[in-house]
Image (cartoon, rainbow, N blue to C red):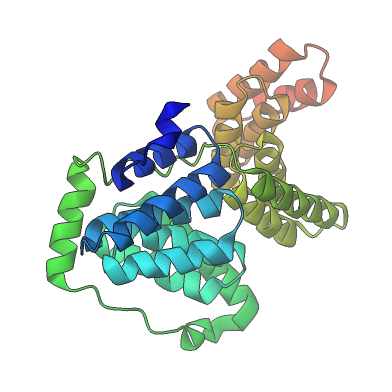
Amino acid sequence: MPQKRRSQSWTELKQAGNECFRAGQYGEAVSLYSQSIQLLEKSGQKNKEDLGILYSNRAASYLKDGNCSECIKDCTKSLELIPFGFKALLRRASAYEALERYRQAYVDYKTVLQIDWNIPAAHDGVNRMTKALSDVDGPSWREKLPPIPTVPMSVKESLAQAASSASSPQQNSVIDNKKNAPGPEAAKKAKALKEEGNAFVKKGEHKKAAEKYTQSLGLNPTEVTTYTNRALCYLSLKMFKEAISDCDEALRLDSANVKAFYRRGQANKELKNKKSCIEDLNSVLKIEPNNTVAQKLLQEVQKMK
């Protein structure tokens, strides 16, 4: 292909990297972003923002490929160029979390919330890290945290504007699309973590299992059974709202998933959502008319006041 032979500009290489990222070719994206970074650094143009975005984009590719330590390095580099860039902070937090470096992940998630309070991924991250850290470090876990940086007001204002307008296609050209399939390395790690979770379920250790499933989903958010397995754990832990949201996600990925309908029905029953519970169980019976477990639960629920 002649296009490859003529020397490409850093913007063309970046664009090609974005296309590979969107197509799920994360290794190829890393290579193209690296070439683009090299060209831009050689050119002597002191364009901090463009370089910062390139490092953050390459970090996203590393994260998808399960290469968390390189992702952290790139995010840190990006944050030196664009202080408090919220995408780089979120990506670094995810990588820290996958490596079980929960204190650093907590600090990054909290920093994101200072910049923009309306980022659900950061709220979820803070909640997960709070649980993980109180398990590991006990009630005084906050004392062991590294300092959380204070985001200057000027940064908050300009970044909040950028985050809400999201008008610059360049800045948003690699979107944190959680639903992208993972690269082969990440998929392998995710599978191993899921299997660790399954082993904990067999021992009846649902809390530990749920943590493993959470780590697995961080690397591969497209695996339906990991959501339904974690929902089972949440039911055992009486975390019924969390169980429902995992079943919702499983059904978004597979609209005829019997386990997701049944487990959501169980959670709705516990939350006294009679109507929703009956709908879920009827959905199970539409797919599997002879499912005796669902029939039995449906009879119980119909008697509920």
Residue in view at x 50 percent, y 50 percent = 30
Give the quarter of the image for residue 274.
top right
Left or right, 54 with reference to 252: left
Q: Nearer the viewer, residue 145 or 56?
A: 56
Q: Is residue 62 in view?
A: yes
Q: Would you place residue 198 above or below residue 254 in this image?
A: below
Left or right, 178 with reference to 78: right
Residue in view at x 76 percent, y 24 percent = 294
Q: Nearer the viewer, residue 70 or 86?
A: 70
Q: Is residue 128 in view?
A: no
Counting from the top left corner in percent of width and height, residue 261 is at 65, 27
Counting from the top left corner in percent of width and height, residue 3 is at 40, 30
Residue in view at x 21 percent, y 61 percent = 45
Give the quarter of the image for residue 159.
bottom left
Q: Nearer the viewer, residue 61 or 140?
A: 61
Give the quarter of the image for residue 77.
bottom left
Counting from the top left corner in percent of width and height, residue 174 is at 38, 42
Q: Would you place residue 244 above or below residue 45 in this image?
A: above
